[in-house]
Amino acid sequence: MMPVLRQVSEKVLLIVLAVLVMYPMLQDWKKAEVVSMELVKRAASVVEQKTVGAPMKMIGVEQVPWRADPVWDGEYFGWVESLEYRDPKLENRPSYVVLVSAMLRTVLQKEVKFWGRNPYGSVRVHLRKKWGTQWDTQTTLPTNTTDYTTVITFAELTPSTEYQYVIQLQLNGTWYTHYEDTLETFPTEGQLIPSEKPLVFGFGSCITPNRPGTMTGESLKLLAGWGKAVKFFLFIGDFIYFWDELPHVTPEYNRYYYRRLMTKEVVAAMRAYPWFFQFDDHEVHNDYASEGDPSTHPYHAPAMAAWDNMIARANPAPNPPFPIPPKELPFVRWYSYSYGNAHFFVADVRSFKVNTKDLTGQLLGEHQMKALKHWVTTNCKREKLAWCFFISPTIFNHGSYRTDLWFGNMKEQKEVTAMFSAPGLAPISILSGDSHMAGVYEIATNVHEFTCSPVDAFGLFYPWSVPPRFAKFKKGRRPKNFDMSWPALGDLPPPKAFHQHVAGHLRPAGFNCIVEVNTSVSNGMGTVTTRFDLIDGHVKGGKLLYTHFQSYAHTL
């Protein structure tokens, strides 16, 4: 009896201590939220009033500081964005958050895309070759069918050429200069990337900046500071963290994108260089899986309507190498592109995902897997001095006991590993995110994984050492959803980890992951080299944690 009473008293004491510690923090968050809402109202009125006067360098909603508050959603401790979203009834929550913005989004060899949102008038972009005299101008009027977003595309451009651009916004009849900068189109596909002008790009996933704590947003600030040294950034999932208890309707999703695209650190990083995107679960619902048919899942259509308008329409167009069944074609969001002899396949691991308890489910699905095989055999050839990058929003190598990751779909995991490690292929690097950790792993011969998350969010304890295929759980430590019916399907050994870094659980964290690719030619021999830098961006000014080099040579 006494041990039971002692345990009860200890629990009561812990609860009392937790309340005493958390109460002042909750009061601070409430105060911050009141201030934030006042700034939002004031910012909305600024947009309405700025209709006369001299042209302005920057115009639109002023950057609104905002906070997040932690809630327990029954499964994990996650950051939910802003108290204003917490009431499940739409009519009870404010609707005065107004996003007015435009920016360069993607660049290819002969095409560039600009994205904008403007409920008050048109969006205009001027483009010309650097120091040229003739501007090419396009103007479009966004409508409410796309939530006042638009994409302006310039095609038939010259590869490896610098261009100037000017973005203008029309507010209630008056035109203002919103932003201006330069860009450089990508080199022709297959052209060797010289060592004197290497390809440098960044990648990562997961953003929840400006949450409670210190040093928030520092990693995004560092990311913006790379400037023109970085050619593009691959953001591969969890751009927003939708609160799963809200109605899954497009206006609700839109609010999260408005706030994200009004955060000054995010805007600065996105304006520094082009951004390519792919979605993961939190753009829809935590651990989202369509179960094979996105047309029948109630969350898919409303979430993707917001995703397409705010993000995906400015991505490179999906380019399947073979006809896709008409029923599936509207849901194809994987795509590929090239920068010289570097080739990228950006996978969609949610639209056709199927979870099964026996680990034989799927992440890619039949047609995406077929497209991936075509991409590998076409592009990833040593004689072309290629280097290939497979972009997976979820971590590939070890996962955990959760079916949400590649391990939970071991059949496809093994198939992709065998495909990438086939004899004669150029190296294929897997770039992944999602798990709020960073590391470098050897998957197979010529196949390494570089995982990088968060870009700017929080750390999570990630049990990489206890996947069920090779772990022996201690008594009382087995995960509650561990299913003994899972067959081994052939045990995979733990991957070789060159480096792994896990930030403190739920503490503010952020990484800058930068990749460099270059090619050198000497005496009839070509050598392709990649360099991966893992940088702790949460440290002011950044701190280099690890550098990984890879290279291979082939006769020309």
Image (cartoon, grey):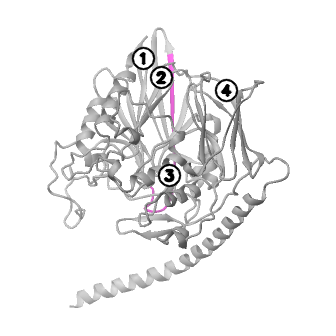
Earlier along the polypeptide chain: callout 2 or callout 1?
A: 2
Pair 2/3: label in front:
3
Real-space Cα separation, disc 1 to disc 3, in angstroms: 39 Å
Amino acid at dot 2: Asn
Amino acid at dot 4: Glu
Amino acid at dot 3: Ala
Closer to the camera in the image, 287 or 446:
287
Q: Quadrant of the C terminus?
A: top left
Closer to the camera in the image, 284 or 511:
284
Q: Quadrant of the N terminus?
A: bottom left
The magenta-colored residue range is 503-520
Q: Are marks 4 and 3 in contact (CB under 8 Å)?
A: no
Q: Are marks 2 and 1 in contact (CB under 8 Å)?
A: yes
Real-space Cα separation, disc 4 to disc 3, in angstroms: 32 Å
Circle 2 packing at 10 Å, graded few (<14), some (14-19), many (20+), is many
Q: Residue at x 16, y 42 (%)?
A: 490
In this orientation, does residue 534 appear? Answer: no
| Residue 474 at x, y percent in the picture | 20, 62
Under circle 1, the secondary element is helix
Q: Are marks 1 and 4 in contact (CB under 8 Å)?
A: no
Q: Which residue is mark 2?
A: 341
The label on residue 306 is 3
